[in-house]
Image (tube, rainbow, N blue to C red):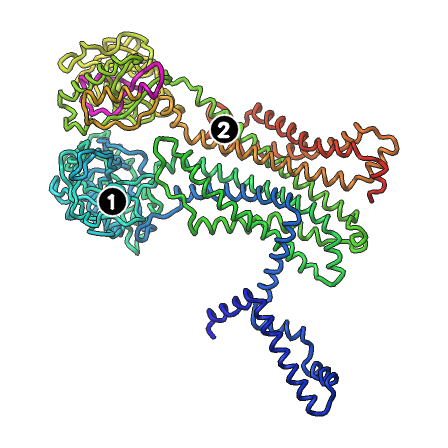
Amino acid sequence: MSWPGEIARRLRTLWHRREFDAELDEEMRLHLELRKQQQMERGLPEEAARWAAHRRFGNSTRFREKSRMAWGWEWLESFSQDVSYGARAMLRSPALTLVALASLALGIGANTAIFSLLDALMLRSLPVKEPSRLVLLGRARGRGITDGFAATDFYSYPFYRQMQQKNAVFSDTAAIFSMMNDVHGFVEGRADSELMHVQLVSGTYFPTLGVQAQSGRMLTDADDNSEGDHPVVVVSQAFWKRSLASDQAVLDRKLKLGTTMFNIVGVAPPEFFGTTVGEEPDMWVPLSMMKSVPPGWGGYKDNFNESLYIMGRLKPDVSVEQATSNVNVLYQQILRGFPDAKLNQENLQKLAKAHVPLTPMATGLSYLRREFSKPLQILMAVVALVLLIACANIANLLLARSTARARELAVRQALGARRLRIVRQLLTESLTLALVGGALGIGLASVGNRLLLRMVSGGLETLPLNVDIDLRLLGFTFGVTVLTAVLFGTVPAFRATRLQLTESLKDGRGPQSGVSRSRLARTLVISQVALSLILMVGAGLFVRSLINLNNVDTGFNKANVLRLQIDSNSTGYKSDDPRLNALFRQIEERVGALPGVQAASFSSFTFNEGSWNGSVAVPGMPVNHELDVKHNVVGNGYFKTMQIPLIAGRTFGPQDTATSQRVAVISEHMARTLFPPGSPIGHSYHIGSSDDPEIRVIGIVKDVKFEDLQEETDTLDYLPYTQRDWGFGDFEVRYTGDFAAISIEVQQAIHSVYRTIPITRVTTLDEQVARSITNQRVVAQLSTFFGLLAVFLSCIGIYGLMSYVVSRRTNEIGIRMALGAPRGSVRWMVMREILILVGVGIAIGVPVVLAGNRLVSNMLFGVRGTDLSSLLASVAGLLTVALAAGYLPARRAARVDPMVALRYE
């Protein structure tokens, strides 16, 4: 018989044990009956014949055991018996079982939930062909467009083409536009627009990844060989289902993006979400059509319009080191070879220092990874410590339970059971407990990972990350469960079987075993206290850091400001069309006239939305090309809307028109650092070089936080949109009254000016600032929750230990009280032991805290990792809670009746 058939047969025997035993008994009975008949035919009486048949047959019990060993797996059968016995033992101690299962479910569930997010963000490979061979040129730090010389994160389209043709190390090369275009497009035949996330890619994108279409075809290099001639698009599986209702005739459908009709040529497979983790494009369009997709980025033929990421697939026999060498040689050659390259001394120095690293792309690109990798690692360590505390807690409970079972275990050993057999049974009980706790943990994780994803998203939309429980997560959970069973089950199992049979058989309360178990229990409690202190101090530091961030002076008043986004590209006006500025002014005036509205303004950016950076040239001052000024194009009412204080000069007004002198308002920091001593009002500067138009400073405003709350003071200037073309998205409104009512009125006012303009992301400036510290908030909230959970578990451990100690010392306490000891003295005896245990745990935990807080110091703001107040508060809180947990056993000890106690043992 083949081994699969043999396994199946043995499993059938195991699961149908009763049927097998019945068949075996029937077969044995027939054999005995046959032998009995043979003996009777030889002349023996019936009774003598029966005994003779039994003697000839042999030991029937031994025969049964041999048959079971031959037809089944003895170890598996024994294991199933141990599991069954363990389950019955768990049901006999419901309180202990419930506490243990709750502790395990929380610990394992938390580990699984956080690992699921960690796996989705950092560990899971892209669903493409051989992802380990994909590499990225540069590190993709940020996204946008630059014309800076010798950039190593962004590249131009002509550079990509030359790298594709000349390299000797990649079997395929592809380019990706570094930003995703959010377009309000139309499905052909529909009057209403819908938001579409469009990713611009080279025609070699899908062939490089090895992704095949579910229907139709993917983009090819032929779709990307001439600008503006290939209006084709591949849609994602999600978009096909959501917007096209899974239309089987999808290849006959068209989409309108901007003013161009695009033919749908294919549908991507369901598992493919792109190459950026945390983003999910609705469609992919060839780079040759970049100017046709709003907002109409140019630069397809510009050698130094650098906005692309470049990735390559390594040839099978090429190492990363060889590829890096070849890429860097070509990098120098290509840039120097462009006919419009400005090879001045400064640029040549930049080129000499430039180096292009190759970054593995097996797990894809991710901007979230840089933001959340450290917080998730910290949280993973936190929940691992919580699980350790839970294991110590359960080990203590099992030790206490083994005392109650001492007589049972002694009887089994006295009857001949080997110690290792009993240890195996106790470990099986621990494993059963852990597996049930793990199953409950998976249930909690399936809910918790969704909650965690919403917390991490921190915005109006949940991040498109797949955190469902899959085989990888089940494997992780199973590994954690088995490890947990080993951690909390091994020591109690060996301790429980180290018995003095005589003492244990008397009443199960042998003194020596009680002392050793008490010592181990104390050690476990001390470890729980030390770990709880670490978590409490960490939680305190993260909470204080979050409070400090919330109290940062942003430079503007974030309260009572409504903000929303409009898609000005949907109007069909170009950014330099005068009708667009007229539309902006009309919307500002219409909204500004609403009751409850104090001011309204458009802006290119508000807070934490990226920036437009560039160097500036101030006449008479040296140019610092390393210092980028952040530019913000705004309306006349921007400073009133944001309540940014004016320090000197004036802000923008109706006199600042397209034909008047170009003007700017600058920040205090820019005034101090880029202009000569004295007031810069009336001075001029240039954005870019001295050849660019002159801009005159008319005002100075207070410094503000622009990209995040932790940034150093930024250098900013503000330009009026009447003098700087910009297709706006952001609109801010300062209001009084109810947000919901004002929000409806503002949107109605905008649509009264332009009926079909899309309005999205309606929120408040306060919420937008709060979303910028999502990772700090998540860490603070979860570390606080798990810190409190750790303290709670430690309290259970302290309570359980002291209850056990009091029960063991009942006779001693009775003697003390019979000899005249006051109840307060007895109570203090118990409380003193609690203080000693907690004090030792704190003494161990404090050095660990001081050494380990350096690991999280870069995640803190306005507080040091060695902050004394956080440490003292945690110590005080832990002492208070621990004493409260130990007070009940102490009070019970003080109420012992001496006469009852003297009869207790």
Question: Is there CB contact under 8 Å for labels 2 and 1?
Answer: no
Where does the C terminus fall, quadrant-wise?
Answer: top right
Looking at the picture, tell me which residue is in the foreground, 864 or 11: 11
The answer to if 734 sits in the magenta stretch is yes
Say which residue appears at 16% left-offset and 37% top-offset: 256
> Quick check: 601 above or below 86?
above
Please state the horizontal and vertical placement of residue 767, each as a whole percent of the image: 38, 24
Which of the 4 quarters of the picture holds residue 34?
bottom right
Kindly identify which residue carries mark 1: 245
**How many other residues sit within 10 Å of disc 1, few (<14), some (14-19) or many (≥20)?**
few
Q: Nearer the viewer, mark 2 or mark 1?
A: 1
Please state the horizontal and vertical placement of residue 757, each as a whole percent of the image: 20, 26
Magenta span: 714-742
Amino acid carrying mark 1 in the image: Ala
Amino acid carrying mark 2 in the image: Phe
Q: List the single residue furthest toward the bottom.
A: 42
Kindly identify which residue carries mark 2: 542
Under circle 1, the secondary element is: loop
